[in-house]
Every structure is written in C-alpha cells, then in structure tokens.
Amino acid sequence: MSYRISEALIGEENRKLAAAQQEDYAALGRRLERGAVDVDAVTAKVAAFAVAVPTWGVGTGGTRFARFPGPGEPRGIFDKLEDCATIQQLTRATPTCSPHFPWDKVGDTRELAERAKALGVGFDAVNSNTFQDQPGQKLSYKFGSLTHSDKAVRDQAVAHNLECVEIGEKLGSKAITVWIADGSNFPGQSNLNRVFDWYLESLAEIYARLPDHWRVFLEHKLYEPAFYSTVISDWGSSLMAAQALGPKAFCLVDLGHHAPNVNIEQIVARLIRAGKLAGFHFNDSKYGDDDLDAGSIDPFRLFRVFNELVDASARGARGFDPAYMLDQSHNVTDPIESLIVSAIEVQRAYAQALLVDRPALEAAQQANDVMLAHRIFKAAFVTDVSPILAEARRCGGGAIDPIAVYRASNYRAHKAKERPAVAGSASGIV
Ligand code: RM4
Ligand code: MN
Ligand code: MN
C-alpha cells in the first residue's frame, strides 16, 4: 500500500490552529462588513475556485545546465497522480491535473482513468508534445513539427495531437493545449508567412477531428527554443489563428510567455473581449519563461490579471469560461510544496480581486479621480485574505496550514522508500 496522508493527521493539525484561525476570520469578516462585503460569500466563491496541477510539475525540474533530483520523485504518471492527489487533499483547490503526452502515456488508458478516479483526481486539458523527439520516432522535430517544411513531419505531428485527444477522451478531458517550439534561429532560415500557413493547415486538421464538446487551446510564447522567430510568438498570432479556426479554438495565456514589461492583464482583457480567452498557465517570472512559482515575484500582476477576470465575470462577458492551470518548473524546492503554495497564491489573487469595490471604482474612473481609483484598486490588493483562504480549505476538509501538515506527515520520506530512483526518469525536465 502506498503512503497517503491520513485525515486524522489533518484533523489533529487543524485543531491546533482552529481557534486562532476562527478569530482572524471573524476579525476580517467584521472589517469587510464595514464595506458591505459579506465575507462568507467571498469564501464560498474561493472554495469553488479550482486550478489544475501540471503532471510535469510534481517532478523536480531543471535548467539546461543541470537538474538536481530530490528524494522520492515520481517515477511515472501513477506516482505523479498520488502527488497531485496529495496537493488536492491538503489545499482543496486542485481537483484536476493536466497531463502531458507522451510523457504520461501508459499502455492501458483505462487503468490510468481508474487510478485517478480512485485517488479523486480528475483531468483538465491534455498537452501534446512535438517539441522533442521520442525514442523510436520516425521523423525528427529538430526543424519544426506542425509547421515543418516536410509534409510528412507535419502529418506525424498532427497524428500525435489526435492521439492526445483520443487518450484525453478516455480520461474525461475536454480540451487540448497545443504549444509548439517551431520557429527559426537565423534570419532567412524560414519564410515567416509560409510557416503560419502551415500552422493553420495543421491545426485545421486537428480542429476538424475535435469531439463536439472539446476545445483547442493555442498557446503562444515569445521565444525559446527558437531564438530568432517563433511561429506563434504572441497573442496577436494566437488570436488570428483562433479566429481562422473557428468557435472551438481559444488562446491560452502562459504568464511567462511575453516580452518583458508587457501589460499581460490588458492582453487578457482583449482576449476576453474577442470571446477567445482559453485560460491560463500560471507561473511567475523575472526575466523570461522562468517558470517560477505563481505569485512569488510579482503578486500584484497576478492580482491585476484576476481583476480583469472578476470584472469580466461580473459583467457576464460572452463566452467567458477560462481554464486555470499551473505551469511551473520546481528546481530547488520540493515540487509538492511549491504547487501547494502556488495554488494558494492563485486563489489569493482571486480573493483579492473579489474585494475590489467595483461600483466605487467605476464612479472614480468616470470622474477621472485618478488617485481615488488607484486607492480603491490597491485597497483590495493589500487586504490580507489569508483567513478567507484558510476557511475555504477548512470547510472543504483540507488543511488550515497545508505546508505544516505536509511536513508533519513526512510524506517525502515515505515516498523515498516506496520509490527507488530509476535511471533516466523523464519527470520534470522542463
Ligand atoms: C512550454 C510551455 C508549455 C509546456 C512546456 C513543457 O514552455 O509553457 O505549456 O507544456 O513548456
Ligand atoms: Mn505553458
Ligand atoms: Mn513555458
């Protein structure tokens, strides 16, 4: 039997913190009441909020220089599912995981579906991978995949995406996220226009075979591994493609995939306006696609993004149904701890955004009272919503302090015994 954290331990740890947590929650409730905000209503919304865990995120990540594996790392998707279930057990914010193929491919998909169900983990969007070659693969993606100059390579990449959809259907997914590394490293290497045609052509084939209730998420990224031009480099290219493909195609925003200093929340607002926002890969960054933990560098930006989302939901924006996922690489922390904290930070930004006094903000904007508008906006951001997040977890059967329970459980030490290291594990190479 593989180790799982007991409900008894969660209860025991919660009992130690319950009195102080209830006191803090009541105090925050009284404070918010002065602004006519019902704290329980905010807590209920936070409790209903979910963000998917990337299966590749529970393995230790690395850089192109080195990877420093930790003890008890997951050796494959079945171990990864256990870790995802643990994150959900403690946070109650991550009921689903987002799998990546072929990394998570197994012989019997039904067995995978059953194991996930037994662990209480569902599946969010599936991710295809045509950015590296797999052992025994017929044709190479060295010079591109869905936009390769050779039609046979494009066909192979299309077939892989269709296989991902097929597996995803068996797992209960309803979307596929397509990120391609295709691009060029030298000016003149490829025709910037023609590669976009090939992208549309390949995606149209995938799109045509999508099950009725499925969506395709197009993920853009400015650069890397292509360092001169990337085929789907920005939200403009992504939107053009999504609009050309049709109503089931949407644009996915990975927070790390933009030029430095770009106003991401404005991109989000535009995509919502176009009815084309797929959702997010949350992470944080300082320089590029750093894949750092969400909210660890710039929590204010995360808040500004959520402000747009809450605003869109409040005004009932057409077609607004974003998928929330984390996409991070944990190189120096225990990945489970990072994912727990990141899920909480995403929830935090949501809770803060729910506190924005929208009628007052609108009045200040209308009157061009710049400082008042900014102060209203900032007031929500500086509110410590931790007691709301803890209350949402407690009511959902999770841990008031998930990291404390995780550490008290010695989960990692148990897994280190259960999971003898295997050579060449594919986990966490991102
Ligand atoms: C990419 C991108 C994709 C992810 C891969 C592993 O940079 O963010 O979403 O699937 O990394
Ligand atoms: Mn991503
Ligand atoms: Mn990325």
Image (spheres, rainbow, N blue to C red):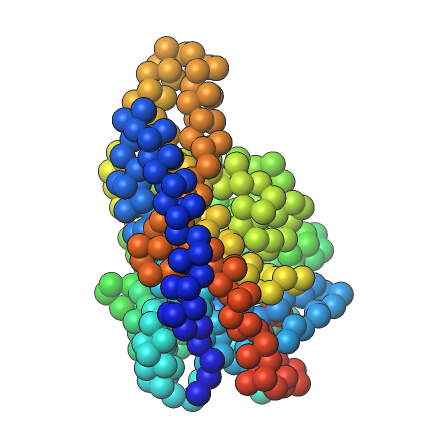
- Image coordinates of residue 50 in percent, x first then y, are 36, 55
- Image coordinates of residue 93 in percent, x first then y, are 38, 57
- Image coordinates of residue 147 in percent, x first then y, are 53, 63
- Image coordinates of residue 374 in percent, x first then y, are 47, 21
Q: Would residue 280 be found to the left or right of residue 263 on screen? A: left
Q: Nearer the viewer, residue 211 or 93?
A: 93
Task: Choose top left, top right, bottom left or bottom right for residue 135.
Answer: bottom right
Up the image or down, 28 lies above or below 57; here it is: above
- Of the 4 image quadrants, the one containing the C terminus is bottom right
* Residue 94 seen: no
Task: Choose top left, top right, bottom left or bottom right for residue 91.
Answer: bottom left
Q: Residue at x 33, y 20 (%)?
A: 360
Up the image or down, 310 lies above or below 374; here it is: below
* Residue 369 seen: yes
Q: Residue at x 55, y 61 (%)?
A: 337
Q: Nearer the viewer, residue 292 or 109?
A: 292
